[in-house]
Image (cartoon, grey):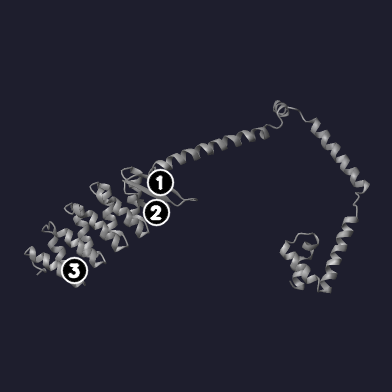
Amino acid sequence: MNCDQVTEKVELYVFGELDFHDEELFEAHVGGCEHCKALVEEHRAILRLMNEVEAEAPPLLLNQCRQGLKRTLAAEQAKPVGWLDRVRDLVPAWPVLLKPVFGCAMLALAFYAGQQAEERKSISAAGFLPTSRIRTIQGTGNGMVQIVLEEPRQRMIEGALSESGIEQALMAAARQSPDPGMRLESVDLLRNRCNRDDVRKAMLQTLEQADSPTVRLRALEALRPHSNEIEVRQALSRVLLKDTSPNVRVQAIDLLVDRPPAEIVGTLQEIIRRDENDYVRARCLRVLSQMRASPGVF
């Protein structure tokens, strides 16, 4: 601590307001600096003088205060007293008396709400869970799913895959979660439920929008038993034309050619014309050859 800092803190030191660390630094400097030591003594002397002086109010001021008090009391006594004032006089402290009552009521309500929340969370997910709150998703292998929520404190929800809340949470995670691992786990848990329209739509959305090629491939595998559905085949055609992963495009071709309709010919011809991957183009040529179709439009 230097002289400027001591000058800044001398009042705090004299009044005992410095913390232990600053006080030690202050005293270490003052012990070796005569100028600062004299400054401290000067402030101590001022403090002693202030403590020794007994302030006494002048008689005129005391008389004026007494007269003012008398006038105020007389004005209050002259006011008419109504029925409300009489009730207030009978129960002067009713707001104070009611405070403990309201406090106990709020405490009981909070306890009941907390108890109900603990019971709900131990049973299952009650309705839709935003993916921003889901930290992890894990299947337990016995048809149950564990979902850990990120809240002010972590809590776990466990329920059967057939429960509406659990299923909705998995579909939301498969479509929207920024965590590829969580998306992958959700797709794996839902893959055997694609016979449901809502689950199949969630899987199609994952196939076309997921950032991770691994997640998109897993969604393709889940949709394989339903490759004859019109909406699935339309999505596969879009994947063939737009997906950035050659592996995903090849798998989409395999799903489409299991039962190749006539409309797939145009899609395969378009891929041969514009795709930069040699293997993808070769795969399309092989399929067109098996269908006895031309590799291009003439």
Relative depth, front residue between 211 and 191: 191
Q: Residue furthest right?
A: 59
Relative depth, front residue between 240 and 152: 152
Residue 95 appears in the picture as rendered: yes
Quadrant where the C terminus sits is bottom left
| Amino acid bearing label 1 | Ile
Q: Residue at x 38, y 48 (%)?
A: 146
Q: Are marks 2 and 3 in contact (CB under 8 Å)?
A: no
What crowding class fits label 3: few (fewer than 14 Cα within 10 Å), some (14-19), or many (20 or more)? many
Residue 72 got which mark?
A: none
Q: Position of residue 147 (x, y in %)?
A: 39, 49
Q: CA distance from mark 1 to mark 2?
A: 11 Å
Q: How many marks?
A: 3
Foreground: disc 3 or disc 1: 1
Secondary structure, mark 1, is strand
Relative depth, front residue between 145 and 243: 145
Q: CA distance from mark 2 to mark 3?
A: 36 Å
State the image quarter where residue 207 is shown. bottom left
Residue 157 got which mark?
A: 1
Q: Nearer the N terminus, badge 1 or badge 2? A: 2
Q: Residue at x 43, y 40 (%)?
A: 120
State whether residue 215 is above or below residue 81.
Answer: below
- Residue under label 2: 136
What crowding class fits label 2: few (fewer than 14 Cα within 10 Å), some (14-19), or many (20 or more)? some
- Residue under label 3: 280
